[in-house]
Image (cartoon, rainbow, N blue to C red):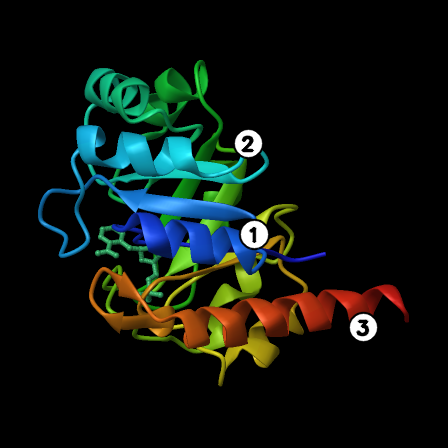
């Protein structure tokens, strides 16, 4: 079973579409330099409007642990995604309060050293987060032993099948389901989430 996370949500209607179309998790970017940035106060009403069985993830980059915890509380989020160069101690501090997804940016083949990073899941992204740029899937090979690998970075309905064939714990998409930065396209959401659901259904029948 591969779970789909829709990242870079900035609008209530996008969150509700993603939920209705079967997203397992929604990501809110709390990185001020991002085109998809929302303040914790702006995230809160959107996060609260979604049903209780959809996981709300806060995306941070190089934000010190105390500030991450403060913003998670203010935004009403449930899981922390660390998308910068956070040392393991930061993940451990945040991890006392929230499950942690550690995002790794790939500039070349991944290092197996990441397998021991203290996080519940590893998310593998391209070099430039949120850019919609993909990377060769062979670069992931050293990380395949991780039990919860989430694949991100330039995913679209066109290249998704090759990624699903690797049977990752999750897939994560932002640009590939957008009409414009920060605005999701309902038809692209439907295509992407539909393909994940069909693949999961087909795998169960094998
Ligand atoms: O989307 C952003 O602007 C962003 C900013 C800072 C950290 C992470 C960001 N997005 C993450 O990028 C990946 C993949 O995005 P894409 O599908 O290639 O556009 C996703 O995990 C987002 O959380």
| Quadrant assignment for the N terminus | bottom right
Q: Is mark 1 within 8 Å of ligand 1?
A: no
Q: Position of residue 48 (x, y in %)?
A: 39, 30
Whether residue 141 is situated above or below residue 150 in the rendered picture: below
What kind of element bears circle 1? Answer: strand
Mark yes or no: residue 183 visible: yes
Estimate the spatial distance between the alpha carbons at disc 3 and disc 1, rounded to whole Å. 21 Å
Q: Is residue 132 left or right of residue 24?
A: left
Residue wearing tag 2: 52
Task: Name the outermost residue toward the left.
Answer: 33
Which residue is at the front of the view, 8 or 190?
Answer: 190
Mark yes or no: residue 81 visible: no
Q: Specify few, some or many for label 1: CA neighbours under 10 Å numbering under 14, 14-19, or 20 or more.
A: many
Estimate the spatial distance between the alpha carbons at disc 1 and disc 2, rounded to whole Å. 24 Å
Which residue lies at the image location 56% right of the left edge and 48% below the top edge? Answer: 24
| Quadrant assignment for the C terminus | bottom right
Estimate the spatial distance between the alpha carbons at disc 3 and disc 2, rounded to whole Å. 27 Å
* Mark closer to the chain start, 1 or 2: 2
Which residue lies at the image location 49% right of the left edge and 85% below the top edge? Answer: 158
Of the two numbered discs 1 and 2 in the rendering, the one whose residue sits closer to the viewer: 2
Q: Is residue 195 left or right of residue 173?
A: right
* Mark closer to the chain start, 3 or 2: 2
- Which mark is on residue 202? 3
Q: Position of residue 151 (x, y in %)?
A: 49, 60
Residue wearing tag 1: 149
Which residue lies at the image location 47% right of the left edge and 56% below the top edge? Answer: 18
């Amino acid at each position: 079973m591969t779970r789909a996370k829709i990242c870079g949500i900035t609008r209530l209607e996008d969150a509700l579409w993603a939920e209705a179309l079967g997203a397992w998790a929604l990501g809110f970017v709390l990185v001020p330099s991002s085109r998809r940035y929302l303040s914790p106060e702006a995230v809160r009403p959107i996060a609260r409007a979604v049903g209780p069985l959809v996981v709300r993830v806060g995306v941070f980059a190089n934000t010190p642990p105390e500030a991450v915890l403060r913003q998670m509380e203010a935004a009403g989020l449930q899981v922390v995604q660390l998308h910068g160069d956070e040392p393991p101690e930061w993940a451990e501090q945040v991890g006392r309060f929230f499950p942690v997804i550690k995002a790794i940016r790939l500039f070349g083949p991944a290092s197996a050293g990441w397998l021991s990073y203290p996080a519940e899941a590893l998310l593998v992204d391209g070099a430039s987060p949120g850019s919609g740029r993909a990377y060769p899937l062979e670069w992931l090979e050293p990380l395949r032993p991780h039990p919860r690998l989430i694949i991100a970075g330039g995913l679209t309905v066109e290249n998704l099948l090759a990624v699903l064939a690797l049977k990752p714990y999750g897939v994560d998409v932002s640009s590939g389901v957008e009409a414009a930065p920060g605005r999701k396209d309902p038809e692209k959401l439907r295509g992407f989430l539909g393909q994940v659901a069909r693949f999961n259904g087909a795998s169960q029948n094998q």
